[in-house]
Image (cartoon, rainbow, N blue to C red):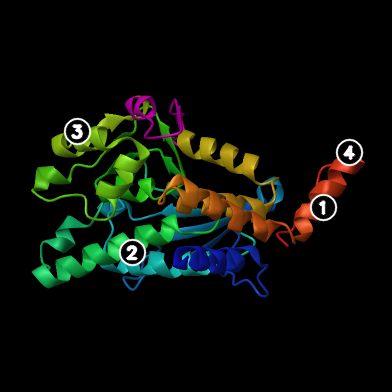
Amino acid sequence: MYLMIRIARFSRQIARPLVEPRHFAIFCSSADLRGRKCMSTKETSEGGNEILVERLEGAQKGITVLGLNRPAAKNSLSRAMVDTFREILDEIKKDNDSRVVVLRSLTPAIFCAGADLKERKFMSIEETSEFVSNLRNLFISIEQLPMPVIAALDGAALGGGLEMALACDIRTAATNTKMGLVETRLAIIPGAGGTQRLPRILSPSLAKELIFTARVLDGSEAKELGLVNHVVNQNEKKDAAYQQALKLAEEILPNGPVGVRMAKLAIDKGMQVDLSTGYSIEEVCYAQVIPTKDRLEGLAAFAEKRKPVYKGE
């Protein structure tokens, strides 16, 4: 009963329109004069723009792209980068204009190399424990974003990099992408959710095999196992997985945003309980879409044989 009360409160919070969504400062370059893309940045305490936030426009309006941009460290996650990432996610989850989030790398041939081991080398035991906890909480924040999140793997996703991708709802990959939970090579374990998400996505026995052996897969092998949803041949720009992620996001955009959010919540929460309780969670989530203007717009558009215009209300 307590679980259902919590889910009901959470679903109402997700379903209701935001009064005043917060936005990042937006900068458009001269190359973006056609109005298709605008970019905003969040600066880290180290002074670099390690995560770029891009809000697409035109037919792709509603897609927010998060670009990992720490090429000198292969996008490895430092303490400062983790803190900045959390700040960005805190803003995005309150933003009703972001209907789909795409997570990608702006560094060629690498998605994310995991935690910054050079920084880790100088951490005390207490600092290491705190960092791993913060990293786990960061990935939980990605997982709990109310809108769909798509990870585009155009480069290697190893260790914590793959754990971050596993926290996303959907994954696309290039055929030559390398990925794996390789922590046992360093005499540790995946500590940011990997031991829990991988067996739920695949199976316990297969997850154990991959983690025990620290096996690295390419995109085609990952697709065969069900680790990624789509695999595509890499292109000259080295962004084939990103382009595939955008295609998926564009398929999601026309649908009712409240309905999509409630579907995600029902699936995510339902997977954590028995089937009977899952039905009750579905009922709670369905109840949130019944009073929405979008539901009435969908019925009206169907009757009038036109495309619906959903506003997330």
Q: Which label's residue is closer to the chain start, 4 or 3?
A: 3
- For the residue marked with disc 1, what is the amino acid? Glu
How would you rate the neighbour count of disc 3 (Cα within 10 Å): few for under 14, some for 14-19, many for 20 or more?
few
Q: Which label's residue is closer to the chain start, 3 or 2?
A: 2
Q: Which label's residue is closer to the chain start, 3 or 1?
A: 3
Of 231 and 263, which appears nearest the observer? 263
Label 3 with label 2: CB-CB less than 8 Å: no
Label 3 with label 1: CB-CB less than 8 Å: no
Of 29 and 159, which appears nearest the observer? 159
How would you rate the neighbour count of disc 1 (Cα within 10 Å): few for under 14, some for 14-19, many for 20 or more?
some
- Circle 3 residue: 209
- For the residue marked with disc 2, what is the amino acid? Asn
Distance, label 2 to label 1, CA atoms, is 37 Å
- For the residue marked with disc 4, what is the amino acid? Lys
Nearest-to-viewer mark from 2 and 1: 1
> Which label number is shown at residue 305?
4
SS class of the residue under badge 1? helix
- For the residue marked with disc 3, what is the amino acid? Glu
- Circle 2 residue: 137
Q: Which label's residue is closer to the chain start, 4 or 2?
A: 2
What residue range appears in magenta? Answer: 221-239
x%, y% of residue 270?
47, 50
Of 244 and 280, which appears nearest the observer? 280
Q: Which label's residue is closer to the chain start, 2 or 1?
A: 2
- Circle 1 residue: 297
Residue located 75% across and 61% down the image: 291
